[in-house]
């Protein structure tokens, strides 16, 4: 604990990654308090690990999702990871993806959440709340007002604001055969998720783009923290049961939809008025990407097993007793999302897209 407090006091450009336990244990106020008094930026775990809304995006120190490809994040000299298991990144590759020069502090409840591959970590194992309260009480004189810290927060905040800006994007004219340009579609979806909405994210290759766009409020966002295809369909049912007074939107890939379709039947039987927005990009785009990487120069060849096209999602929804609608233009998307949701029946929106998004390189 002493080494951790020293490191937090002396660092010039610290960064705090708030893991899922911060939200689960209602520690958001405490984390935000430390961020304010010690002038530390707060980020969510990397896109693959994001599970809950952990800090509020209207807190001035909130700076989006941790990205290993962001040079300013990489310039951090201390990373404090609170309430998160070892990042999936470290299982997928030989390094953890954390800044190379940084000291790493892990504040966790249980030793199994220390990262066995991480040699430079200071582990503080014990009740997370008690640890955070101790850090919050520690004298902050040494770093209070440090101009390097202030500019680190400002720079990271501005970078996230630029990525997440909900300024109206240039909207291409779209026809129903071509579909809605994916970035435009994601922005419109993000704009329509208001303070009474909860998003359940399982949009695979659109995950990072959506995590940048969606505001964070208490219990407003849930994501897989993993990659078991189909999760978002059933998870949206669970969230709708847990949050009966909120508008729940499951934002899922077309592949995810096909892997978890039986959730619609459950939602119909339970009369849950949730909406699944199916990001219909005509296939398993992540699989095509992976095959293209592996095949290198031969990647122009088609990948037939990644094509899941020409499926009538509306008919599937109706077959279960749910509502279904196809949306292929920006106007139709705005209109559909602005309509009051039914009170006792789920809806499937088959959102026809054109173009693709990818998650950050190196992921
Ligand atoms: C249970 C399971 N089976 C297979 C996979 C492998 N897999 C990862 S992404 C993916 C395709 C996802 O397709 P979609 O939901 O349409 O999202 P997109 O890649 O098009 O963004 C597959 C099959 C997995 N993650 N989980
Ligand atoms: Mg897809």
Image: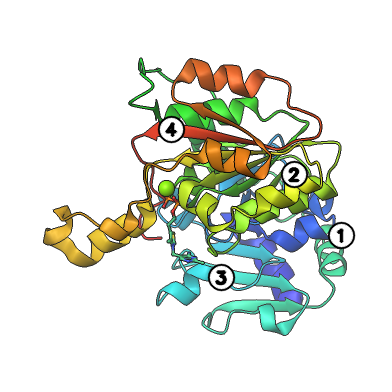
**SS at mark 3 in the image:** strand
Label 2, label 4: how many angstroms apart (C-alpha)? 24 Å
Mark in front: 2 vs 1: 2
Mark in front: 2 vs 3: 2
Pointer 2: what residue?
Answer: 268
Q: Is mark 3 within 8 Å of ligand 1?
A: no
Instruction: Pick out the residue farthest to the front.
Output: 319
Query: Relative to 10, is 151 on the left or the right?
Result: left
Q: Position of residue 255 (x, y in %)?
A: 46, 52
Mark in front: 2 vs 4: 2
Query: Relative to 175, is 338 on the left or the right?
Result: right
Which badge, 2 or 4, comes first in the chain's sequence? 2
Pointer 3: what residue?
Answer: 103
Label 2, label 1: how many angstroms apart (C-alpha)? 50 Å
**SS at mark 1 in the image:** helix
Which residue is found at the position 82% from the left and 77% from the top?
Answer: 126
Q: Mark number for residue 169? A: none
Which badge, 4 or 3, comes first in the chain's sequence? 3
**SS at mark 4 in the image:** strand
Q: Position of residue 74 (x, y in %)?
A: 45, 57
Pointer 1: what residue?
Answer: 137
Whether residue 52 is visible here, answered yes or no, is no
Q: Position of residue 315 (x, y in %)?
A: 54, 38
Q: Nearer the viewer, residue 69 or 339?
A: 339
Pointer 4: what residue?
Answer: 352
Label 4, label 3: how many angstroms apart (C-alpha)? 45 Å
Whether residue 131 is visible here, answered yes or no, is yes
């Amino acid at each position: 604990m002493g080494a951790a407090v020293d490191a937090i006091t002396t660092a010039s450009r610290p960064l705090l990654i708030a893991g899922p336990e911060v939200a689960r244990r209602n520690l958001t106020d405490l984390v935000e308090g430390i961020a304010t008094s010690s002038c530390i930026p707060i980020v969510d775990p990397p896109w693959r690990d994001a599970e809950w809304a952990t800090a509020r995006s209207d807190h001035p120190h909130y700076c989006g999702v941790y990205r290993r490809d962001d040079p300013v994040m990489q310039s951090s000299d201390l990373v404090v990871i609170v309430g998160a298991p070892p990042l999936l990144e470290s299982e997928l590759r030989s390094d953890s993806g954390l800044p190379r020069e940084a000291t790493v502090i892990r504040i966790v409840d249980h030793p199994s959440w220390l990262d066995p591959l991480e040699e430079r970590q200071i582990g503080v194992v014990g009740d997370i709340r008690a640890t955070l309260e101790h850090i919050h009480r520690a004298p902050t004189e040494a770093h209070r007002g440090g101009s390097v810290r202030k500019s680190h927060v400002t720079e990271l905040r501005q970078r996230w604001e630029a990525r997440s800006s909900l300024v109206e994007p240039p909207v291409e004219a779209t026809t129903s055969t071509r579909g809605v340009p994916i970035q435009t579609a994601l922005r419109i979806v993000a704009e329509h998720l208001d303070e009474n909405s909860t998003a359940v994210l399982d949009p695979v290759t659109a995950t990072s783009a959506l995590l940048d766009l969606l505001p964070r409020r208490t219990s407003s966002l849930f994501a897989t923290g993993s990659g078991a295809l189909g999760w978002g369909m059933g998870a949206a049912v669970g969230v709708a049961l847990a949050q009966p007074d909120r508008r729940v939107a499951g934002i899922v890939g077309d592949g995810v939809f096909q892997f978890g379709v039986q959730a619609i039947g459950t939602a119909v039987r339970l009369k849950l008025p949730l909406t699944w927005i199916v990001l219909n990009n005509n296939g398993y785009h992540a699989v095509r990407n992976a095959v293209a990487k592996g095949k290198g120069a031969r990647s122009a060849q088609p990948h037939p097993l990644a094509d899941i096209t020409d499926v009538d999602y509306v008919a599937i929804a109706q077959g279960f007793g749910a509502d279904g609608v196809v949306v292929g233009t920006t106007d139709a998307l705005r209109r559909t999302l602005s309509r009051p949701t039914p009170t006792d029946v789920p809806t499937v929106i088959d959102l026809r897209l054109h173009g693709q998004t990818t998650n950050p390189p190196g992921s």
